[in-house]
Amino acid sequence: GDSVTQTEGPVTLSEGTSLTVNCSYETKQYPTLFWYVQYPGEGPQLLFKVPKANEKGSNRGFEATYNKEATSFHLQKASVQESDSAVYYCALSGTGGSALGRLHFGAGTQLIVIP
Amino acid sequence: NSKVIQTPRYLVKGQGQKAKMRCIPEKGHPVVFWYQQNKNNEFKFLINFQNQEVLQQIDMTEKRFSAECPSNSPCSLEIQSSEAGDSALYLCASRQNSGNTLYFGEGSRLIVV
């Protein structure tokens, strides 16, 4: 079945340092890949998505490239801020029928940014 | 700022009691999902609807949960007889017919004591 594996947290960084959260996936389909972010007391919010292999998504300084050969979708940010502290989820979506839009989430990576 | 509205934000129930949560999907989104997020942040898909029809559901949902999305009324998820293991954040999400992006509400946190 479909699965997503990501960096185990928590990840603790100082403000201004760079972030990489690894994400690997398994699927027999051709998924859209997502990064969601969840702040305390809130539901997950879409950070960005990439529907096609070899394309890059980005938002708020975060970016990830859909690498079909390596089955990876690593999240990166050059310089984190305290406000980036949250839990980040990598997810994939099926591409057809009732599976369309059903997301398979990774376990989440908690990011703690120290000022 | 979620456009998917979930109520209540919190509910506390005793074991064996019913627990009911409601969801108003984003306007124009006919497909609705319910997920359970446990204390380890793991997501479990429960059920999804397209308009009023169930698309998929897991065994647990068939047996102890009931859910519906009636026309012109909020969707709902009800646990018939709450168990301690049901304590979790219940997330509702919606999407467009042809899209694959889910938009989540803020969730209803159930505590079963």
Image (cartoon, coloured by chain):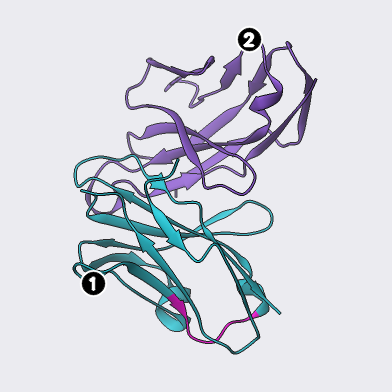
Chain colours: A purple, B cyan
Amino acid on which disc 2 is placed: Ala
SS assignment at label 2:
loop
What range is drawn magenta here?
B78-83
Residue A63 is covered by the magenta coloring:
no
Q: Does B80 lie within the magenta span?
A: yes
| Disc on res. A51 | none
Q: In the rendered structure, which amino acid carries the disc numbered 1?
A: Pro
Residue B1 sits above or below residue A14 on the image: below
Gap in Å between the C-alphas at discs 1 and 2?
46 Å
Q: Determine the image quadrant of residue A32.
A: top left
**Residue at mark 2:** A78
Residue A8 to residue B73: above or below: above
Relative image position of residue A109 (x, y in whole percent): 66, 36
Instruction: Determine crowd level at label 2: few under 14, some 14-19, many 20+ residues with C-alpha closer than 10 A.
Output: few
Q: Are marks 1 and 2 in contact (CB under 8 Å)?
A: no
Give the residue at mark 1: B70
Nearer the observer, A37 or B1: B1
Residue B13, visible in the rendered structure: yes
Task: State left or right for residue B3 relative to residue A71.
Answer: left
Q: Residues within 10 Å of mark 1 (few under 14, many from 20)?
A: few
Where is residue A30 shown, x and y percent of the image? 32, 33
